Image: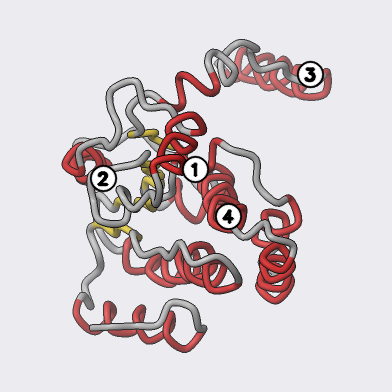
Amino acid sequence: MRAELGTARGRASLVAAVARLAPEGLDGAALVAETDTPGPASVAVNYFGTVAVLEGLRPLLARRPAPRATVVTSAAALSAGDLEIVDACLAGDEATARASAGVAVVQGRGSVVYRSTKIALNRWVRRQAAETRWASAGITLNAVAPGVVDSPAGTRSGTATQAQFLALGLPQPLGMPGPVRAVTSAIAWTLAEENASMTGQVLFVDGGADAVLRGEGPYENGVRHSPAAVGRMLLRAAVARLRG
């Protein structure tokens, strides 16, 4: 079926159609739909459409023994986005997010809208994956973030100057464009039964762009627990020893 993910009605119709086709539950869901059109439409489809449909499918996923969910984001999220758009998305405020996207276009910053929706989606996955509604139901929730791939959309880079600018902004040491199959294979694995213990991850299938642009950034500092958290851990350990 076809559904307009930019509207609440379209999102609900898609969820209802899946429920009719899979009344006993859904083993896996890959949310791939997106638009790179600058402006409110990108916000409506890329973020709110994806999240609404996935939330709607969650009860169907929870009925199955090994449910998996994956969203497709983008390595474009490695660049800075518009904080007003990102924050409004994460707050669930679609009207404000759409309005902020419109302002960005008027200001000549339309290109920031797409990556802002993907930044928000990555952060949503990280926030939600370990929550009771997902993890306690055994549902893995991950994101796959492709770089520029060998597809009509991925290779539409305009002039030679624009292509050079893209290569500098999103360097891919393994080559640009990357193979589509590498991305589809990553999506397939995240949905496979073998993926029983990975959740909340953003997998950059980007030809090495993440490694070049962020280096050791995500890993150079270890987790630092607050004094209160350390106290809770020590208390729980003491209680466990007394009970043991």
Image spot of residue 59 (x, y percent): 39, 68
Gap between marks 1 and 3 measured at Cα: 40 Å
Gap between marks 2 and 4 measured at Cα: 26 Å
Gap between marks 2 and 3 measured at Cα: 40 Å
Task: Please give the name of the residue rendered at 43% of the width and 49% of the height, measured from the top-left corner.
Answer: 73
Q: Circle 2 — which element?
A: helix
Instruction: Name the foreground residue: 239 vs 40.
Output: 40
Q: Which of marks 4 and 1 is in front?
A: 4
Q: Earlier in the sequence, mark 4 or mark 1?
A: 1
The answer to whether residue 158 is above or below residue 241 is below
Amino acid type, label 2? Ile
Residue designated by label 1: 76
Residue designated by label 3: 231
Gap between marks 4 and 1 measured at Cα: 10 Å
Image spot of residue 202 (x, y percent): 44, 37
Residue designated by label 4: 111
Q: Which of marks 2 and 4 is in front?
A: 4
Tag 4 and tag 1, C-beta contact below 8 Å: no
Q: Which mark is residue 187?
A: 2
Q: Circle 1 — which element?
A: helix
Amino acid type, label 3? Gly
Image spot of residue 58 (x, y percent): 40, 64
Q: Nearer the viewer, mark 2 or mark 3?
A: 2
Q: Earlier in the sequence, mark 1 or mark 3?
A: 1
Task: Please give the name of the residue rendered at 46% of the width and 26% of the height, measured from the top-left corner.
Answer: 210
Amino acid type, label 4? Ser
Relative side of 6 to 70, left or right: right
